Amino acid sequence: MSKLRAGWLAGVACIGIALGGLSCAKRPASEEATGTGGSGEKAPLGQASAKQGGQEIFLEVLELSVGKPEKDEASRTSFVTGEPISTRGRVRNAKELESRIQWHLQPVGPQTADADPTTHEGQDAVFRAFSRVGTAGSRQPNPPLEYELVASVLLENGEVLQVRLPPTTFLRQDLEDVLRQEYVDFGTSFRPSRTQLSIPGRRTFNTGNYTVIAEEDAGGLAHLLEQLDGKIRALLNNDVQEKPVGTRGLSPGTVVVSPGGAILEVGALGDTDPQGDDLCAGPRVGNRCTGSILAGPNGTADTRANNRELTWKLEDFVSSAFRNPQRNRAAGSVVINSHHTRGRALDLDPRRMPVPGKTPQQLMCIVEAAGDAVVGERDSFTERGATRFLDCNDPMADHVHVER
């Protein structure tokens, strides 16, 4: 995270200016670095000096800050467009010149537009930045917006004092604000604050271009995944024990274990393998029973319901979670306010999920049914790509999208 380095003095160059043949005065950086702010004062961020009438005159940049600083970063100079960039200067030993300080916020790089205003006169100045970064979509991080701050003042003797604060140490977007800037550029309804950015606890939550993600509700993706995981496992363990294990004297056709409730598009799906001489009375998938289990010739209930072990982790089947606006556009989404950009959506691809006795289409339907139960039918649906909606058992489907 980029922060203003208190006490650091810019290597200030008072460059030559063609002003009636007069040159700009300057001081060595080593001399300026001692600070001349007086006892108990912070050293200026940058300064330049010259002699006038036998007296040393100092132009000093005292403050540079962005917006309303957050508690833990009172000197933040990273920014997004729309936030005020404020600066304050001083002319020591010639206070009457402070109203003539000229401020210029100079853009660095083609991605950065002219500030508003481009120049300002006075002891204090407030600017706003602008972006030239496009919104065509990208799988790479955006370049940071950055500015060079230049302060100058014309002395009575015609000399010009000038201070430059270079962008690499001052007005340059850090990673958090580069990400936040995308939301401004795209005009989204959700504009994350810095406190809504975090490094995700699970790597699969970040399918964006940065090391941090934005979540409208902190921990929302983790909570959604946990709820879905619980519901999917419940659907894969919902066979009913009709007769307690060990029950004797049953007719061979007595149902010992029956499949659970029907799942949309694919019906009831058993998740139990026959034990002892119990028999499978339904269809098989991959040589695993998906129907009812019967008592068999010995008339004894030998089978315990839901005896298949589930060893996978649902997070391994997350195909997309958080996507920054540029990445979301690059993925083919035309929805500016996509739930993916708000940290409120998961795409799950269960086709390779190692669940015995289930086809990829059946697993897709089970995951959609779990999503329906967690977030409602309107917010859980099966897709191919970012824009094509399909029935869950369609062989063309490649993921289930779940949002809240």
Image (spheres, helix red, strand yellow):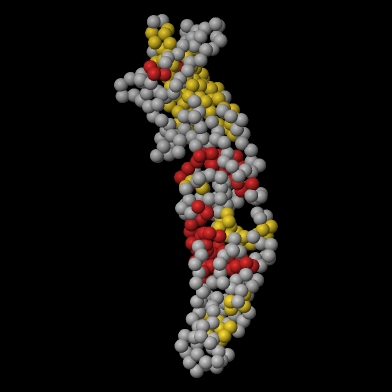
Report the residue at 55% width, 6% height from top: 20
Count of numbered marks:
0
Image quadrant in which you'd find residue 29: top left
Q: Return the residue found at the far left.
A: 39
* In the rendered image, the vertical position of residue 336 relative to residue 80, given as above or below: below
Report the residue at 56% width, 83% height from top: 293
Image quadrant in which you'd find residue 398: bottom right
Report the residue at 58% width, 60% height from top: 348
Report the residue at 60% width, 33% height from top: 111
**Which quadrant is home to the C terminus?**
bottom right
Pick the residue in front: 166 or 149: 166
* In the rendered image, the vertical position of residue 105 relative to residue 258, given as above or below: above
* In the rendered image, the vertical position of residue 49 relative to residue 317, given as above or below: above
Residue 79 screen position, x and y as percent: 50, 35
* In the rendered image, the vertical position of residue 73 relative to residue 55, given as above or below: below
Residue 337 screen position, x and y as percent: 60, 49
Pick the residue in front: 131 or 400: 400
Q: Is residue 26 visible?
A: yes
Q: Is residue 96 visible?
A: no
Residue 75 screen position, x and y as percent: 42, 33
Image quadrant in which you'd find residue 365: bottom right
